[in-house]
Image (tube, rainbow, N blue to C red):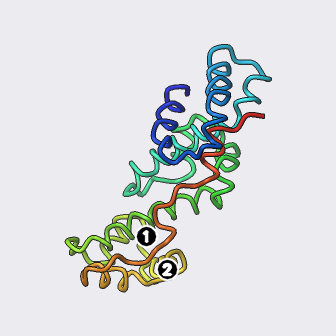
Amino acid sequence: MLADYMRLLERQLPNLTDEDTRHLSQAIAAMVAACVEPSADRIAEARGQIGASLKDKARRFVLRNLHSPRLGPNALCRELGMSRSNVYRLLEAEGGVARYIQRLRLLESFAQLSDPFNRKPIVEIADELGMPDHSQFSRTFRREFGISPTDAREAAQAGLVPSAANAHRVERNDIVGLLSVL
């Protein structure tokens, strides 16, 4: 857990503000204390850091398994070694487990459709990412990014960067979780 937290922190360092860095030593100390000598108080003190580490582990697992038809809450529970209710609680702010997985699949489909060299049919991209209902995929894609999958592909092929402000933003809540100290 501590190693996962440190790797996550390392990846997020470029996104930290001056205010964030002021809390860094306290956050690291809380996480180290909770891992080295766990107690209810120390674990409570490091709750934000533990949650951020678990969320990152969940994100990495989902990304590695985006193409798997078995990707779902049960697989995530096994990977994280957590109960179903704890996994749902962990991803509650993301809209739940299914919404979280769907969002990452949509982000991957957006990336593929934004690649002007990717010639796969849109339906094939959706199928590979576990979204076989093509009309539902199109509606969900449009709701998420404000453009249709076809428009995203056409923009990329025209040499334009498709507009999707939400596509790859760092979640401020994740950084706060990395550094939170009660």
Q: Residue furthest front?
A: 18
The quarter of the picture where residue 86 lies is: top right
- Residue at 70%, 38% in the rendered image: 180
Spot occupied by residue 138 in the image (x, y as percentages of width and height): 45, 81
Q: Residues within 10 Å of mark 2 (few under 14, many from 20)?
A: few
Q: Is residue 7 left or right of residue 20?
A: left
Whole-angstrom CA distance, mark 2 to mark 1, is 8 Å
Q: Nearer the viewer, residue 127 or 145?
A: 145
- Residue at 37%, 85% in the rendered image: 151
Instruction: Label 1: state its secondary structure.
Output: loop
Q: Which label is found at residue 162?
A: none
Q: Residues within 10 Å of mark 1 (few under 14, many from 20)?
A: many
Q: Is residue 30 left or right of residue 74?
A: right
Q: Is residue 16 left or right of residue 11?
A: right
Spot occupied by residue 161 in the image (x, y as percentages of width and height): 34, 76
Q: Nearer the viewer, residue 93 or 80?
A: 93
- Residue at 47%, 36% in the rendered image: 10
Q: Is residue 53 left or right of residue 83?
A: left
Spot occupied by residue 5 in the image (x, y as percentages of width and height): 54, 32
Q: Quadrant of the C terminus?
A: top right
Q: Are marks 2 and 1 in contact (CB under 8 Å)?
A: yes
The residue labelled by disc 2 is 136
Q: Quadrant of the N terminus?
A: top right
The residue labelled by disc 1 is 131
Among numbered discs 2 and 1, the one appearing first in the sequence:
1
Residue type for callout 1: Met
User: Compared with residue 131, is residue 77 higher up or lower down, i.e. above or below?
Assistant: above
Residue type for callout 2: Gln
